Amino acid sequence: MNYEFNKEQALGRAARLCSGSEHCASQVREKLLAWGASGAEADDIIAYLTREKYIDHMRFARAYCHDKFCYNHWGRTKIRQMLRHLRLTDEEIDEGMTAIPEDTYLQTLGEVLRAKDRTLRDDNPYQRKGKLVRHLLSHGFEMDCIIDAVDDFLGL
């Protein structure tokens, strides 16, 4: 299957892609290069899409944070790391983090904690605590929130 398009076709496809769901410039650039666009053409297309508001990093960051938190139950650390990987600025990342309310964040941490606890077989509370902490860290929650939640949950 040949995916090479001329510049106008690539622009049209990229515009449709961005119209359907939020994407950042690095994701669109990756697609454009896969479709056979040169680096300069990709830069031109991304500049046009940004000017026309098909690509908006603040909007993307809010949507990304909301979705990864609500559907994947990721913590702020993991979300922040992935947004940095997508080459968003700290300002854009901070704006995206506003999509996660603090009370909902702590509630979700508790839900992930209880779900993992139901799968554990350890009777030793310290081994159980270690497994819970590692699991929550892998989801990207912050250590201070994890320790407070696990200690409250286990009564330690």
Image (spheres, rainbow, N blue to C red):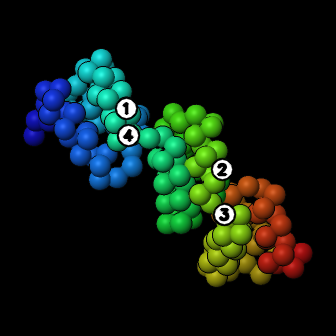
Mark nearest the camera among 3 and 1 is 1
- Residue 31: x and y in percent read 29, 36
* Near-viewer residue (94 or 84): 94
Residue 107, given in percent of the width and then of the height, sits at 68, 73
Q: Are marks 4 and 3 in contact (CB under 8 Å)?
A: no
**Residue at which label 2 appears:** 77
Comparing labels 4 and 3, the label whose residue is closer to the camera: 4
Labels 1 and 2 touching (C-beta < 8 A): no
Depth check: give the residue in front, 3 or 48.
Answer: 48
Q: Which residue is mark 1?
A: 51
Sequence-wise, the earlier of marks 4 and 2 is 4
Question: Which residue matches tag 3?
Answer: 101
Where residue 71 appears, as percent x and y from the top left, is: 49, 66
Amino acid carrying mark 1 in the image: Arg
The 10 Å Cα crowd at callout 2, few under 14, some 14 to 19, many 20 or more, is some
Mark 4, other Cα within 10 Å: few <14 / some 14–19 / many ≥20:
some
Q: Which residue is mark 4?
A: 53
Toward which corner of the image does residue 112 lie, by quadrant? bottom right
Q: Is residue 98 above or below residue 83?
A: below
Lateral position of residue 124 relative to residue 81, left or right? right
Is residue 109 among the parts visible in the rendering?
no
Question: Of label 1 and label 2, which has the lower sequence position?
Answer: 1
Residue at 58% of width from left, 34% of height from top? 89
Callout 1 crowding tier (Cα within 10 Å): few <14, some 14–19, many ≥20: few
